[in-house]
Image: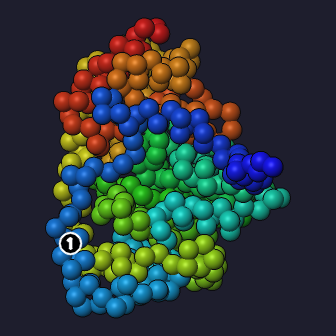
Amino acid sequence: MTVSTCAPFPKLSALATDTGSEAVLELLSLTGRPDIISFAGGLPSPKGFPIAAVKEAADYVLDKEGSCALQYSQAEGVPELREALAQMETEHGIPTTADEIQIVTGSQQALDLVARVFSVPECRLMVESPTYLGALSAFNMTKPRYAEIPVDELGMNPDALDDSCSDVNVAYVMPTFANPTGLTIDETRREKLAEKARKYDFWLIEDDPYGELWYDKKPPVSLRHFAPERTLRLGTLSKVLSPGLRLGYIVAKPEIRKIFSGLKSSMDLHTSTFTQLVAARVISEGTLKTHIPAVRAIYKGQCKAMLDALDEFMPKHPEISWTHPTGGMFIWLHLPKTIDSAVLFKEAVADKVAFVPSMAFYAGKPESNHARLSFVTVPPEKIREGVKILAGVISRHL
């Protein structure tokens, strides 16, 4: 009797078989090739990693607090890092206590927790259109009903919110140097958005991974300034310190923060004690404050290189334009409606250039005639070469 050694494939949950990200993963899998000039990534520049400072902090933590650093710790995060981040938030103009800080394993986990807490079947989840694809990936796990608010050249326009928003439970917004558009919502619109949140009784989720990456002028004050009673703020150390440390945080009222702590405990118990203590040391020593200006200078130069290349090489066409960010990592390229950026992507990759097609950034029916360009990890001379090639590919479709 022959016994089969092939085990049957197990039945999978709906979450495992319908993540909604397969197309994006397939597209981006092509961009890791060394011969590709990739504007597709969303990674911070390694030039901005304070390696020496992190090594010094790690040595200190192991020497002075080794037993604690290598042990389990609290679900809400170690007190040292929570205190340091609360102080940072307070210095930004919004008084914050450590009891309002929830440490998470990168801000992507924060999005997952937000989805679990705020996705209510009878309510809708409001997002900008376009919005961050990582947020959509997290939210889609709970199968929400979306309310999409289109952005204009100034970002989300709160004047577009009317009585149809009465069933919205939470609005997810990236108001500063947004991914994918690079746009920043001005202070007037932030205040109006807070007023609409009160009028229609929904919560605001302010995702701010890029807020410290301003080039010449600080961005407007946080949404928490205008609606502290109904705003949760998501922050991260990935863009200003290191993504490899996997450290993010949520700022929320203590009663909400405790809900996040309970859920996080069931997910991964807690974020790495060691990396939390290392980051706390870097912040408390003042290293982060002195380091961030160097990161801003790198990104400003990279952004200028891409904007100059776009001005030089892009076809002069009334339907071709792009955003001009004053901080962050991304430029949003607008193309004629006759151009499908997914088709354009395949042709561009064949010519050794990559970007992210716009279809990935929409909760509902996508607009296909845009592209996200990231400039922070590509050398300026390669930016110029890549934009020239991309412009040539676009010209073939005009």
Task: Report the number of discs.
Answer: 1
Left or right of residue 217, residue 317 in this image = right
Left or right of residue 41, residue 102 in this image = right
Q: Return the residue nearer the eye: 28 or 12.
A: 12
User: Residue 310's x, y, as percent?
Assistant: 31, 25
Residue 294 placement: quadrant: bottom left
User: Residue 66's x, y, as percent?
Assistant: 30, 88
On screen, 179 above or below 253? above
Left or right of residue 262, residue 214 in this image = left
Kindly identify the amino acid type of the residue bearing the numbered disc 1: Lys
Q: Residue furthest front?
A: 1
Q: Return the residue nearer the eye: 373 or 324.
A: 373
Dot 1: few (<14), some (14–19), or many (≥20) neighbours within 10 Å? Answer: few
The residue sitting at 53% across, 82% down in the picture is: 75
Q: Return the residue nearer the eye: 376 or 168.
A: 376
Left or right of residue 309, residue 16 in this image = right
Q: Residue furthest right?
A: 122
User: Residue 279's x, y, as percent?
Assistant: 31, 75
- Res 260 seen here: no
The residue sitting at 46% across, 8% down in the picture is: 398
User: Residue 355's x, y, as percent?
Assistant: 42, 31
The residue sitting at 35% across, 13% down in the picture is: 392
Q: Return the residue nearer the eye: 216 or 340.
A: 340
Mark 1, residue position: 55
Colouring style: rainbow
The residue sitting at 44% across, 67% down in the picture is: 248
**Callout 1 secondary element:** helix
Residue 37 placement: quadrant: top left
- Res 353 seen here: yes
On screen, 353 above or below 374? above
